[in-house]
Image (cartoon, grey):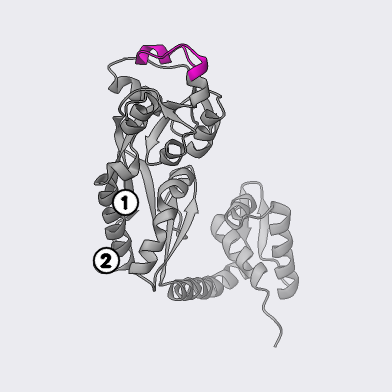
Amino acid sequence: MRRLPLGPMEAFVVAARSGSLAGAARVMNLSVPALSRRIRHLEAELGCRLFRRQPTGLELTEAGRSYFAALAPAWDGIAAATEAARRGGRENVIRLSVMPSLAAAWLVPRLDGFRARHPRLVVEVKTSPELEDLGARSDLDCAIRLGRGPWPGLDGVPLFPAMAAPVASPQLLAANAPIGSATDLLQRRLLGTRHQPAFWREWFAAMGLDAVPACPDGFDNLQLVYEAAAAGMGIALGIEPVVRPFLESGRLRPVFPAPVRLPRDFHLVWRTGTAAAGGKLEMLRDWLLSEAAEDALHPAEALDLKTQWQRAQGRT
């Protein structure tokens, strides 16, 4: 039996449904010439034309309509069976999207605790500074988001609040005039992320200032922001628990004695209806809530921003 031209067959089904080569090429992540070659290969294999190229797009020939009517349901069945097999082989895997800085500073150091409690489950951490669209990402089960919520089509729980305070390197603080108030920061170089430009504005509002600071230098994640601040490039907004390792090491120090709460939280979110009772997402949710609660109960171990500021001032 001759081998079936599966790649060209998929190209044909996608192109027939899309009605255009460009649209089908986007769906298959191919160039238009590459997609055209696959369709020509299938036409040569079958010995007939499947499409007419019209100015408005693709039009199925009579042979193409008959072939599509027979092939499309079978192809859908193959796709469904393949996806079911993938899910069946990964029932013990939880695919979690999280911002890189939170993964490095808070989540990853705790994952051994989850493995000890649930040895049959594996958490695959996929980092991204963006808010991934879980509705369009079948390769993700859940995500930790920093925001206000709720989000359409998603269920979730808040893990902990976003507590923030300006931080800078000890060298930068020593080399410049003391910062006495939040207003003084408006004259300083501020660092921030491109995807969360509102952080500084929210902090100034919490300090009672209706101020829009100059656009901060943009980095794509908070880890880079804090590295830049530690290198003396400017003042960053330290957000617990992401900034904690930099405070514990002494590379950054708080500018003011205590953090303020931003109007947002770190949330665990998942697609509505996918966290069945007793399922793997519920196990991850309960463990994360437990870790977040334990973290909040141990401020001395956390070396929170206020303690760090007091140490920098020689008060502890």
Q: Which residue is mark 1?
A: 154
Residue type at mark 1: give it: Leu
x then y, percent, for residue 135: 40, 53
Q: Is residue 97 left or right of residue 303?
A: right
225 or 113: which is nearer to us?
Answer: 113
**Mark 2 residue crowding within 10 angstroms, few (<14) / some (14–19) / many (20+):** few
Residue 60 in sight in this render: yes
Residue 215 in sight in this render: no
Overall secondary structure of the magenta section = loop
**Looking at the image, which residue is at 71% across and 84% down?**
2
56 or 261: which is nearer to us?
Answer: 261
x then y, percent, for residue 233: 56, 24
On screen, residue 42 above or below 171: below
Quadrant placement of the N terminus: bottom right
x then y, percent, for residue 127: 49, 50
**Which of the marked residues, 1 or 2, is nearer the chain's N terminus?**
1
216 or 3: which is nearer to us?
Answer: 216
- The disc placed on residue 190 is none
- The reply to whether the C-beta atoms of the residues labelled 1 and 2 are less than 8 Å apart is no
**Looking at the image, which residue is at 32% across and 25% down?**
257
**Looking at the image, which residue is at 44% across and 54% down?**
108
Q: Which residue is mark 2?
A: 276
Q: CA distance from mark 1 to mark 2?
A: 14 Å
